[in-house]
């Protein structure tokens, strides 16, 4: 397999745990996508239409500021990109991440965490944030804890 990076955004820790386990399975490096201003529990209250996450997700052009732009994307051929599903798509900070680097010619494999939603329109909303030459693989949405054997089987099934 080519040189692989597992990049991920995690608001509550679920996606972080999955990403770290996936990186172990792949023998890959990790990079955490962090917002310049961390999300609080109040920010993530999806029942409050005025919460930070609700306001961001209501505006398709929203791009939350990143804490840094030091991801070593250029060093990798394949990037597994993980995030929680918010409002049936990736959080807009994922678009901000994609728009901050050159992914031309790379393979991007999506994986997500969710309590019940699928990918929805995620791929359609992420594609415009990258060069047309990106090879996209809409991977899988995982629910709850996932063991190494399950992740290994999933990775083996991917058209990499």
Image: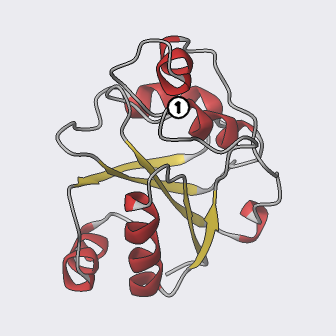
What is the count of numbered marks? 1
Vertically, is 119 above or below 148? above
Residue drawn at the location 55% of the way across and 81% of the way down: 28
Vertically, is 129 above or below 110? above
Residue 95: quadrant of the picture = top right
In depth, the one of 143 and 7 nearer the eye is: 143
In depth, the one of 97 and 114 nearer the eye is: 114
How crowded pointer 1 is (Cα within 10 Å; few <14, some 14-19, many 20+) is rated as some
Vertically, is 94 above or below 26? above
Lateral position of residue 105 relative to residue 124, left or right: right
Residue 125 position within the rendered picture, expressed as x and y whole percent measured from the top left: 48, 25
Residue drawn at the location 41% of the way across and 59% of the way down: 15
Vertically, is 150 above or below 41? below
Residue 111: quadrant of the picture = bottom left
Residue 99 position within the rendered picture, expressed as x and y whole percent measured from the top left: 72, 36
Q: Secondary structure at mark 1?
A: loop
Residue, disc 1: 43
Residue 154 position within the rendered picture, expressed as x and y whole percent measured from the top left: 24, 70
Residue drawn at the location 68% of the way across and 35% of the way down: 96
């Amino acid at each position: 397999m080519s040189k692989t990076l597992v990049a991920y955004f995690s608001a509550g820790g679920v996606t972080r745990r999955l990403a770290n386990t996936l990186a172990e399975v792949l023998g890959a490096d990790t990079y955490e996508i962090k917002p310049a201003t961390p999300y609080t529990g109040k920010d993530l209250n999806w029942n409050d239409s005025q919460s930070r996450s609700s306001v961001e997700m209501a505006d398709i052009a929203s791009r939350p500021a990143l804490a840094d732009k030091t991801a070593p994307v250029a060093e990798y051929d394949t990037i597994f990109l993980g995030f929680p599903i918010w409002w049936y798509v990736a959080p807009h900070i994922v678009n901000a991440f994609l728009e901050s680097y050159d992914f031309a010619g790379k393979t991007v494999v999506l994986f997500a965490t969710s309590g019940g939603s699928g990918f929805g329109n995620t791929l359609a909303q992420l594609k415009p944030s990258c060069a047309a030459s990106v090879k996209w693989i809409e991977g899988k949405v995982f629910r709850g804890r996932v063991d190494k054997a399950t992740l290994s089987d999933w990775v083996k099934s991917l058209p990499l």
